[in-house]
């Protein structure tokens, strides 16, 4: 049984015991949407709305469900109501754009789309952009292989290679607090093989394959990837999968090849794929998903079929590993999947030390700060330090004297920051409990002591 189907079944069972659980109901509704069970989704969101009639989030999802079911009229009604509110989420504008496009109001659709992505660039949707383009300019050429060409000519296509930014990070493992076991995995799996290739060869131990890090946002995945490159003085190429999908619609495979080629040209290099779940994701309406050809291209590149990946270290990160195609997890590909939890007390002290380096400060009781920041991510800790520093700057401006940071400044700032990892665990928990094939999420189970 499909893991998502299984999850749905289990969540529905759970709902029998707590029919008033709105977050659970919302998750069920969203899962129905993901599985394209739009009629069930509509029913679920309606039932949920009955429990909490003023909830805008539920209304929005109900509109999405109607839209996905092809019932644009009720979707329009809800969206227009939501847009009348004070601060509508740009996701509402995005849905509005889709509805306007269906209604052949193309210019208005473009305006809404551009507005939505100007507020939140994560909402970029190349497929929708392409549909709008095509509707505006129906004579656009379609190439023989079925690719849709935007207004550019083939000559205008400059190889993406020129646009890829290759970084030389100045940070290394010293700049990463905690994460000891992840660092160790990276050393064993990719740094040692790079530095001692001969030894590995003599033992007939194959090298290659990458590490996939997953976990709640802000806990240092991207930071550690960058530091890995710094640690071995390698080049660093960071790629948001969504960028690959965006750049040249229909040419994603070529883009991807260029990326790997660039890394090979700059070896040793760390090639880092962020939001890698966008690649393996099953086709969903509100999220983009790459097609099968792109996935196959990615797998071929990972396997180094056409060109050798020697000297290319591959790291990837995601918040939603459950969306990834299992083909990625085979040996030689992402065969190490590592959970990156929020920092524990000791790691929080280390991260604070790193963040406070070279700042004017009195001796600080960081253990006390760590004690008050359970469930905080590294990014949350950074917010705490930022707030405390800002307060100190304005104090210094007023008094004309440099005011060094003190423990109480940090403790005060802690009160203004909410840990941002909880929400992630709410959904991760369900996957760990109900869809934990092959013990994939045992680390989450252990972490949450489920
Ligand atoms: N272990 C750490 N040591 C030092 N700084 C950290 C650590 N973890 C997080 N930070 C700080 O928090 C910021 C955000 O972390 P980062 O972007 O690496 O998180 P992430 O896990 O990639 O999150 P997302 O899943 O949202 O991409 C970093 O730029 C860094 O300043
Ligand atoms: Mg990141």
Image (spheres, helix red, strand yellow):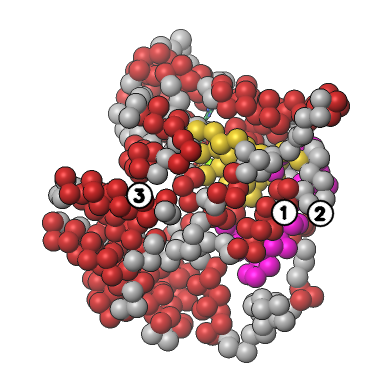
Q: CA distance from mark 2 to mark 1?
A: 8 Å
- Seen at 30% across and 29% down, the residue is 415
Relative image position of residue 398 (x, y in whole percent): 39, 28
Q: Which residue is mark 1?
A: 300
Whether residue 288 is situated above or below residue 168 in the rendered picture: below
Please tell me how many numbered marks the rendered image carries. Answer: 3
Can residue 114 be seen here? The reply is yes
Disc 2 element: loop
For the C terminus, the quadrant is top left
- Seen at 48% across and 38% down, the residue is 438
Q: Which residue is mark 2?
A: 306
Q: Residues within 10 Å of mark 1 (few under 14, many from 20)?
A: some
Judged left or right of residue 199, residue 135 is left
Say whether marks 2 and 1 touch (CB < 8 Å).
yes
Residue at the farthest front position = 1
Q: Which residues are magenta?
A: 242-271
- Seen at 63% across and 58% down, the residue is 295
**Which secondary structure type mostly characterizes the magenta part of the structure?**
helix
Disc 1 element: helix
Whether residue 353 is situated above or below residue 297 in the rendered picture: above
Q: Nearer the viewer, residue 416 or 4?
A: 4
Say whether marks 1 and 3 touch (CB < 8 Å).
no
Relative image position of residue 157 (x, y in whole percent): 75, 70
Q: Is mark 1 within 8 Å of ligand 2?
A: no
Judged left or right of residue 325, residue 101 is left
Q: CA distance from mark 3 to mark 2?
A: 38 Å
Q: Residues within 10 Å of mark 2 (few under 14, many from 20)?
A: few
Q: Which residue is mark 3?
A: 7
Judged left or right of residue 415, residue 228 is right
């Amino acid at each position: 049984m499909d893991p998502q189907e299984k999850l749905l079944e289990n969540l529905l069972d759970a709902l029998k015991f707590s029919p008033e659980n709105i977050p659970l109901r919302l998750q069920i509704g969203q899962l129905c949407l993901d599985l394209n069970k739009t009629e069930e989704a509509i029913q679920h969101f309606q039932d949920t709305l009955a429990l909490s009639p003023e909830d805008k989030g539920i209304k929005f999802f109900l509109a999405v469900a109607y839209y996905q079911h092809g019932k644009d009229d009720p979707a329009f009604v809800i969206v227009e109501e939501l847009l009348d509110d004070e601060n509508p989420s740009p996701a509402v504008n995005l849905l509005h754009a889709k509805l306007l496009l269906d209604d052949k109001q193309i210019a208005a659709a473009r305006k809404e789309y551009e507005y939505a992505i100007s507020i939140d660039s994560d909402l970029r949707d190349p497929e929708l952009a392409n549909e709008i383009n095509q509707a505006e300019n129906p004579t656009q050429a379609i190439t023989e292989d079925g690719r849709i060409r935007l207004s550019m000519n083939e000559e205008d296509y400059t190889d993406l290679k020129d646009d890829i930014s290759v970084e030389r990070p100045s940070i290394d493992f010293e700049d990463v607090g905690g994460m000891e076991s992840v660092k160790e995995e990276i050393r064993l799996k990719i740094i040692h093989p790079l530095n001692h290739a001969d030894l590995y060869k003599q033992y007939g131990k194959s090298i290659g394959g990458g590490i996939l890090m997953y976990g709640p946002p802000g806990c240092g995945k991207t930071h550690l990837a960058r530091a890995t490159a710094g640690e071995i003085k390698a080049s660093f190429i960071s790629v948001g999968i969504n960028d690959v999908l965006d750049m040249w619609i229909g040419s994603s495979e070529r883009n991807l090849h260029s990326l790997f080629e660039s890394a090979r040209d700059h070896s040793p290099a760390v090639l880092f794929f962020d939001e890698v779940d966008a690649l393996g994701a099953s086709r969903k309406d509100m999220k983009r998903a790459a097609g099968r050809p792109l996935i196959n291209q990615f797998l071929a590149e990972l396997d180094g079929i056409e060109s050798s990946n020697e000297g290319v270290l591959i790291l990837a990160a995601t918040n939603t590993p459950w969306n990834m195609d299992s083909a990625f997890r085979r040996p030689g590909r992402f065969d190490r999947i590592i959970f990156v939890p929020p920092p524990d007390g000791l790691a929080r002290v280390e991260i604070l030390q790193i963040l406070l380096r070279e700042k004017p400060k009195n001796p600080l009781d960081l253990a006390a700060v760590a004690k008050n920041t359970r469930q905080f991510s590294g990014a949350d800790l950074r917010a705490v330090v930022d707030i405390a520093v800002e307060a100190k700057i304005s104090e210094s401006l007023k008094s004309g004297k440099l005011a060094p940071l003190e423990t109480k400044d940090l403790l005060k700032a802690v009160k203004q920051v909410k840990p941002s990892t909880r929400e992630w665990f709410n959904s991760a928990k369900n996957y760990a409990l109900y869809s934990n094939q092959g013990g994939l999420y045992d680390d989450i189970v252990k972490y949450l002591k489920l």
